Amino acid sequence: MTDQWTDRLSEYLDGELAGPERTALEAHLVSCDACRTTLDELRRVVTNARALDDRPPSADLWPVVAARIGLAARSQPRPVVRRFSFTVPQLAAASVALALVAGGAAWLIARRGPVAAPVVISRPTPTLLNASAYPGDSRYLAQVADLERALARDRGRLDTATVRVIERNLRIIDRAIRNAQSALAADPANSYLNLHLAQEMRRKLELLRQAATLAGARS
Amino acid sequence: MELTTPGVATLRRDPDQRALGDAETADAALAASGDGRAFERLYRAHVARVHSLVRRMVGPDHADDIAQDVFVRAWTKLATFRGEAAFGTWLHRLAVNVILARRTTLGTERSRYDDSADRLDGVAGRPAAPELSMDFEEAIGRLPDGARQVFVLHDIEGYRHEEIADMLGIVAGTSKSQLHHARMALRKHLER
């Protein structure tokens, strides 16, 4: 059974009926069992629709998609990607994850204040595992500067989203380096901090090297 | 404990969804630069939703073909994805466009929005006894093209009438009317 209001019930349900019409319909609903029932059923239809589960296709469509976009004929997407064990964003993500964990540890150590050097270590001054990664080392600084110049020159060849990822992660690594340097200033004999700083600096160098190589390979 | 190390506190506050979105944005960037494995990850993550959308919009017969078209189209358009919205949102809108573009080929052009009452009655008139009631999805598939597409876009996908009218080339009033007819027809297929 329908009446003049039946066709307006969906609009009412969706909140699209306003003013006098809404008031009149609500007054009608008080006295009309049929419209109340219909409204409840419409509400259940909407609820059912929103609860529907997505189902995958019965057969995997990927082989056909891959063939149509030309991926099936090659085992790897592009030769330039094959040069690396990891892609730049993967490397950046891994770098950042390590930087964050190590940086957190560095912060905790710095917060505790200076600690006594282990008895078995008799070095009077901090010794980094890799001399080329020492912050004041001219070779390290020159390498970083060279790579930054190369990346700046060729960055236009990279996708902008990739550039954003690289730059964001370089900033995070730089912050981790600065934190480690600050912590070392307070506790210069801390072997963990020395190691952490060296690792972060090598990480930055590696990320820059891979990004610059990738950008250069796009030419 | 809140650490002040750069990034750590931020990561702790990030909801899983944002992490997923970042991962997909990164995959989209990789795919745009030609990384097929990244694109396959995106395909795996979204194929169920895309295929379900296609199947509901045009029926099961052409669903596989059109879903493939959606991903092929996405591959060619990846450079236009800038990460302002979630990748899924971008892909979903692209899927709708591909589906609507195929309507003409499939004979579901605009004239079909003048759905006859007979077809709607055919859906609504099916016996509602529990043993005979059809699956709700199947009932949606039996709706006339216009009513089905509006119902899917509005009630399942969450588009507004103005957006639907724009996509389908109809007026918002027609979209509202089609939606109501679709809902009225589907009432008969609610589980008792």
Image (cartoon, coloured by chain):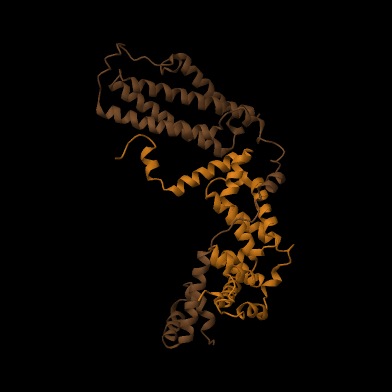
Chain colours: A brown, B orange
Indicate the position of residue B164 as horizontal and vertical percent values. Answer: 59, 65
Q: Residue B105's image quarter?
A: bottom right
Q: Residue B117's image quarter?
A: bottom right
Which residue occupies 41% across, 21% down? Answer: A198
Which residue occupies 58% across, 31% down? Answer: A155
Relative placement, left or right, of B183 versus A138 is right
- Please tell me whether residue A151 is drawn above or below residue B147 in the rendered image: above
Q: Nearer the viewer, residue B3 or B133?
A: B133
Relative placement, left or right, of A124 versus B105 is left
Q: Nearer the viewer, residue A180 or B60?
A: B60
Indicate the position of residue B180 as horizontal and vertical percent values. Answer: 56, 75
Asked if residue A103 shows in the view, the reply is yes
Total label count?
0
On the rendered image, what quadrant is the C terminus of chain A found in?
Answer: top right
Indicate the position of residue A27 as horizontal and vertical percent values. Answer: 42, 85
Relative placement, left or right, of B136 versus A189 is right
Asked if residue A16 shows in the view, the reply is no
Indicate the position of residue B127 as horizontal and vertical percent values. Answer: 60, 80
Which residue occupies 68% across, 48% down? Answer: A65
- Please tell me whether residue A202 is drawn above or below residue A108 in the rendered image: above
On the rendered image, what quadrant is the N terminus of chain A found in?
Answer: bottom right
Task: Name the outermost residue toward the front.
Answer: B131
